[in-house]
Amino acid sequence: MDFEVSGSLIVYVGIAIVMLTIALIFIVRSTYVKRSNSNLAAKHEGKAFSSPLEGRTKYPDVDTFGLSGTFMNYGILAAIILMILAFSWTQYEQVIDISHLLGTLDEEIEMETPRTAEPPPPPPPPPPPVIQEVPNDVSVETVIQQDQSISEETVVDAPVVIEKAAPPPPPPPPPPKEEEEEIFKVVEDQPAFPGCEGVSDKTEKKKCAETKMLQFIYGNIKYPAIARENGVEGTVYVKFVVEKDGSISAPEIVRDIGAGCGEEAMRVVNLMPKWEAGKQRGRPVRVQFNLPVKYKLE
């Protein structure tokens, strides 16, 4: 029959065995002290022993070796009891209630826009164009055309050709820059926190991954002392990129509530193990993930 034993029960049983052992030692010791105070010499004077083993001590009444078997059996019994309790000791992991946080991962981040000054008044309209009158007496310049015809007697000088040095060759084009791969925000298969690889249904897998992630976050996060002393509460938003190999990169605080809460959330994000990478059309891609971390004093 299987039964569960808590750690406190083992401690209590161990203390009881130690106290019982000490009590037995005092009882046996007091018994032998009383026997030793009696007139043992007169009691055993002229007594003949049946065997040398029986007379191995001068006074058998105070022979402490006579109880060695009893004490050995007692020690074996105590060791068996402690061993059974130790093998039945059940230690449970700390259960973190995150049921009220499961629906918060899909919240949109509300960014606070800074207040701007009032826009300046529009400029005045441009003045109307001025219409100028064109006079009728426009002078026309007379162009005299020269005769450009060539006859057999016309002497034509050969053009002088000036040789120019060849221009230097252009420099080679720079090597093409490696384009950074696109970071997706929504993909067909969203990245998932590890621990739910055996779940085939997408909805159940998403819920399982969110549960595992929230248990990891709120199991490792520590409320900053300065935030606790000043009663700081709220939600910190951290965004990061889940790479194609599942690693976390480029963590960034999108919205902070101060008092060290954002830095603590970043510390826990950097502790995350590798995720199951997101996929688009069957191939792994880089996906941006927005994570809200809620701080609330209880």
Image: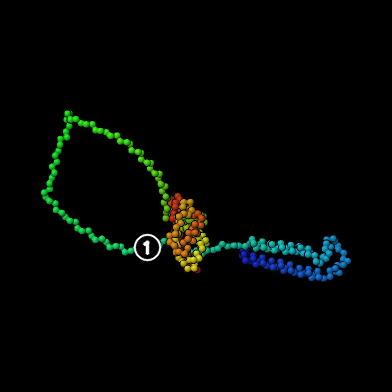
- In this view, the residue farthest toward the left is 137
Query: Residue 128's image quarter?
Result: bottom left
Residue count near mark 1 (Cα–Cα under 10 Å), binned few <14, some 14–19, many ≥20: few
Q: Can residue 211 be seen in the rendering of this structure?
A: no
Residue 54: x %, y % from top left: 83, 62
Quarter of the image containing the N terminus? bottom right
Label 1 sits on what residue type? Pro
Q: Secondary structure at mark 1?
A: loop
- Which residue is more in the foreground, 76 or 138? 138
Q: Judge left or right: residue 179 versus residue 228.
A: left
State the residue in front, 145 or 198: 145
Q: Which residue is mark 1?
A: 114
Q: Horizontal and vertical percent for residue 107?
A: 43, 61
Front residue (pair 272, 103): 272
Residue 280 image offset from top left, x and y in percent: 43, 51
* Left or right relative to 174: residue 74: right
Q: Residue furthest right?
A: 46
Tell me if residue 170 comes above or below residue 57 in the rendering.
above
Residue 73 spot, x, y in % from top left: 73, 63
Task: Indicate how the structure is coloured in the image.
Answer: rainbow
Determine the residue positioned at 47% across, 60% down: 263
Q: Is residue 36 visible?
A: yes
x 58%, y 62%: residue: 92
Q: How many marks?
A: 1
Which residue is at a point 26% across and 60% down the rendered structure image?
123
Instruction: Report the residue at 69% width, 62% height from top.
Output: 79
Task: Give the left or right position of residue 13, taking residue 200 as reference.
Answer: right
Pick the residue in front: 43 or 100.
Answer: 43
